[in-house]
Image (tube, grey):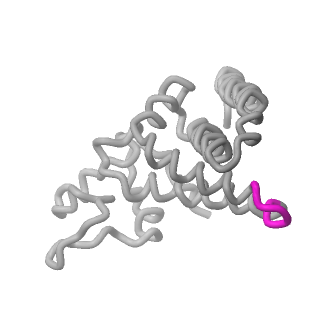
Amino acid sequence: QLTSSTRTACIKSFLILIIFRVILVVLTFPLNLIPIIGTMLFIYINGYYYAWSLHCRYFDLIGLNFAQGKHFVEENRSDYIRFGIVAVSFEMIPFLNIITPITNVIGSAIWACDIERFKEPLSHPRSYLLSPSPALIEQGQIDYGAMKYEKDQISPPAYQDVLENNMYPSAPPNEKQ
């Protein structure tokens, strides 16, 4: 459950980013008057901040404040630019832009799941959440969460095993029914 200070921080970071995005769109909109190059610049500039705003809620959920979220976005700038370019480009296509905001949110949620699942534990901003439990370390699965696996390496446990055995010791305990 969110405390009042956490709730205020979530709202504050969201509002800062949304207000900034509105101002940015208004300031960069005249770029669309320049054929081809202007539209490409508009998409590039606004795409980065659009992708960031889509992950704003994710950052709030994992407990990052605005500065920490900004740091994470800067560290992964190229990913945010690429996602944002595609997202803003699709939202500029007539009739397709009716469904693309929904698909962009879904895409950013899937991306957030990939961040949680596939990042190297120690390089993640919340490494204590992604770090393997002592039981996994004893089993030799210290690279849990890495994307690349050799044939002889043990693959990560199934999602159900993670839930049942509480393999993330710092996560809240799973309530059994």
In the image, residue 94 lies in the stretch drawn in magenta: yes
| Residue 173, x across and y down, in percent | 50, 50
Q: Is residue 30 left or right of residue 3?
A: right
Name the residue rendered at 61%, 45% in the picture: 37
Q: Quadrant of residue 139?
A: bottom left
**Quarter where residue 118 is shown:** bottom left
Whether residue 53 sits left or right of residue 78 in the image: it is right
Q: How many numbered circles does the render carry?
A: 0
Relative height, residue 107 to residue 27 (above, below): below
From this viewpoint, is residue 55 visible?
no
Write the residue at 57% across / 56% down.
Answer: 175
Which range of residues does the magenta coloring cover? 92-97
Work out whether 158 lies above or below 147: below
Q: Residue furthest front?
A: 35
Q: In this rendering, would 106 be left or right of 101?
A: left
> Is 96 part of what is drawn in magenta?
yes
- Magenta span: chief secondary structure: loop
Closer-to-camera residue (94/78)? 94
Write down the quadrant of residue 98 in the picture.
Answer: bottom right
Residue lying at 57% horizontally and 41% vertically, measured from the top left: 48
Task: Point out residue 15 in the picture as x, y percentages from the top left corner.
Answer: 74, 27
Asked whether residue 136 appears in the rendered view, the answer is yes
Quadrant into which the C terminus falls:
bottom right
**Between 85 and 123, the one nearer to me in the picture:** 85
Q: Residue 128 in the image: x percent, y percent? A: 36, 40
| Quadrant where the image shows the N terminus | top right
Question: Farthest bottom residue?
Answer: 151
Closer to the camera, 58 or 7? 58
Rendered residue at 67%/29% (across/down) = 17
